[in-house]
Image: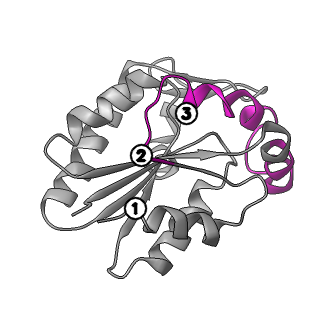
Amino acid sequence: MTQVIVLNGGSSAGKSAMARSLQAVLSEPWLSISIDDLVDAMPAAMQSADGGIEISDDGEVHVGPDFRRLQRAWREGIAAMARAGAPVIVDDVFLGGPSSQQEWEKALSGLDVLWVGVRCESAVAARRELARRDRPQGMAELQAEVVHQGVRYDVEVDTTHTGSLECARTVAARVR
């Protein structure tokens, strides 16, 4: 049975809304955990330090060794929850493309994982980003395609013109 659903997509692609919709349509309760949760849990100083995570004014994201160390522990913690019986939906942004997926594969080894690509046309994601006003303009456009390059998926959805609930139903149909 599927124990982890990993949603990968760029900023403002609709991953968080889809995760909430998945929680609504899946027959059992699932935890939803986002990369934003990790960033929010870090000390504020990590969001401007060379070793942490820095988001430039144009939306480019730079991560350092301290961030990567905490991110590895975060992944292992999510895997431990799934191994303990809590199914988990992960909302992530694979800034490293296939290397990000490989890091998840290592942490989730032995678990049944459904890999989901969440796509959205960059112009639509940029409009969503502008409406949200909670991140620098440009992040969505920078990430829209690059996070998918070289990544393998079991299923892909496109939120450009399809709502989160319909996309969630498509993904839920693949959950075993």
What range is drawn magenta here?
126-155
Which residue is disc 2 drawn over? 154
Image quadrant occupied by the C terminus? bottom left
Q: How many marks?
A: 3
Q: Are marks 1 and 3 in contact (CB under 8 Å)?
A: no
Any magenta on residue 7?
no
Going by the numbered disc 3, the residue's amino acid type is Gln
Which residue is disc 3 drawn over? 47
Which residue is disc 1 drawn over? 174
Q: Are marks 1 and 2 in contact (CB under 8 Å)?
A: yes
Going by the numbered disc 1, the residue's amino acid type is Arg
Secondary element type, mark 2? loop
Q: Earlier in the sequence, mark 2 or mark 3?
A: 3
Question: Cα distance, mark 1 to mark 3?
Answer: 37 Å
Q: Is residue 67 visible?
A: no
Question: Cα distance, mark 1 to mark 2?
Answer: 8 Å
Mark 3 surroundings within 10 Å by alpha-carbon count, few (fewer than 14), some (14 through 19), many (20 or more): some
Mark 1 surroundings within 10 Å by alpha-carbon count, few (fewer than 14), some (14 through 19), many (20 or more): few
Per the rendering, the mark at residue 157 is: none
Q: Are marks 2 and 3 in contact (CB under 8 Å)?
A: no
The x, y position of residue 164, in whole percent, is 64, 66
Q: Is residue 55 visible?
A: yes
Mark 1 or mark 3, whichever is nearer to me: 1
Any magenta on residue 129?
yes
Q: Residue at x 70, y 55 (%)?
A: 159
**Residue nearest the viewer, comparing 176 with 71:** 176
Going by the numbered disc 2, the residue's amino acid type is Asp
